[in-house]
Image (cartoon, rainbow, N blue to C red):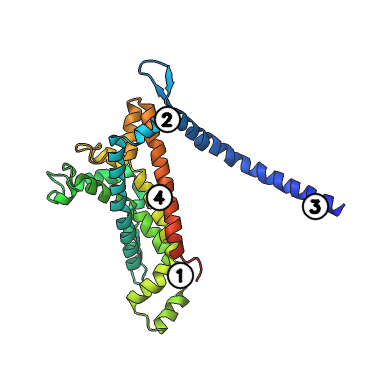
Amino acid sequence: MAVVAARSRKAKEALMAYAMLAPLLAVFAVFAYYPFYRLFQFALFQKFSNSDEERFVGFQGIWDNLSSDEFTSGLWTTLKFMLYTVPAGLVLGVLLATAAHRRLKGIKIFQTIFSSTIASSVAVSSVVFLTLINRQSGFFQNVEFLNLERTGSALRGVALSSVWQNIGLTFIIVLAGMQAIPEEINEAATLDGYGPIRRFFRVTVPMISPTLLFLAVVLVVQALQAYAQIELLTLGGPQGSTETLLYKITELQSRTDLQTGASFALGLFVLTLLISVGQFVMLNRRVHYDN
């Protein structure tokens, strides 16, 4: 009887767990699984212009699109944008958090200033940035490094805008990680003769390494999905030099080229998945999850 009662209790607990998970699974089914199924369907079928007829192109059609020059150029632009924004965002976030992680009078004011960009939307931040680098009246009008009208510097300008937009989030998360470090650890390191620089690299960085790994993944995903700032600052120009994969996907969808756009979207999904998993595999060995 005891065994039967235990099994009945476990069955009720399992049923309750599934009942509590059901709403979440329903949301995933509607907003994640079904759209992905439709994306795959669009990629496998080529729709004729001005007609409802479709032709099955299969995986060969997807491969042809992913090996095209247009996809390659978008991929290269996306990777460059990621390399511009992710390291710079992490380094600046850590530097600002280190500067603000001090017991000084009025330090809360600087913490508020450093984190202020988190309250601004991409649209607002992009407009402010565009005003600052305006070629006629902007404060940085003569900085050619940020010139959005030149093919060689436009992507760097958009990247700097993205770093500035994300710096508030990066700063807050890194600062929270630093504040979570027990004071006893820093005191022990000081007693052991660690100077500020050595203490930073041997104590602080290892202790916030899980935070840095999380931020690295988040910033990479944001870089791979960049669109709004490109649309607002350059419209993909000049001469397509700032057309990332997501920007190309959006443009293809607007031209009703669903098969090519869906193929590009699948390529971007695989790229995001591979880079994210690669980050966890390569960097997880250097992450410290205990004291």
Q: Is residue 103 left or right of residue 144?
A: right
Provide residue 6's location: percent of width, then percent of height.
80, 52
Q: In the image, is residue 136 above or below residue 164?
A: above
Residue in view at x 41 percent, y 46 percent = 272
Provide residue 119's location: percent of width, then percent of height.
36, 50
* Label 4 to label 1: alpha-carbon separation: 29 Å
> Upstream in the sequence, badge 2 or badge 3?
3
Residue type at mark 2? Answer: Ala
In the drawing, what numbered circle is on residue 181?
Answer: 1
Is residue 156 or residue 93 the one in the foreground?
Answer: 156
Residue of label 2? 43
In this orientation, does residue 103 appear?
Answer: no
In the drawing, what numbered circle is on residue 6?
Answer: 3
Q: In the image, is residue 157 above or below residue 193?
A: above
Is residue 259 or residue 33 the one in the foreground?
Answer: 259
Say which element carries label 1: loop
Residue of label 4? 275
Q: Nearer the viewer, mark 4 or mark 1?
A: 4
Pointers 4 and 2 in contact (C-beta within 8 Å): no
Q: Residue furthest front?
A: 60
Q: Residue furthest right?
A: 1
* Label 1 to label 3: alpha-carbon separation: 44 Å
Residue type at mark 1? Answer: Ile
> Upstream in the sequence, badge 4 or badge 1?
1
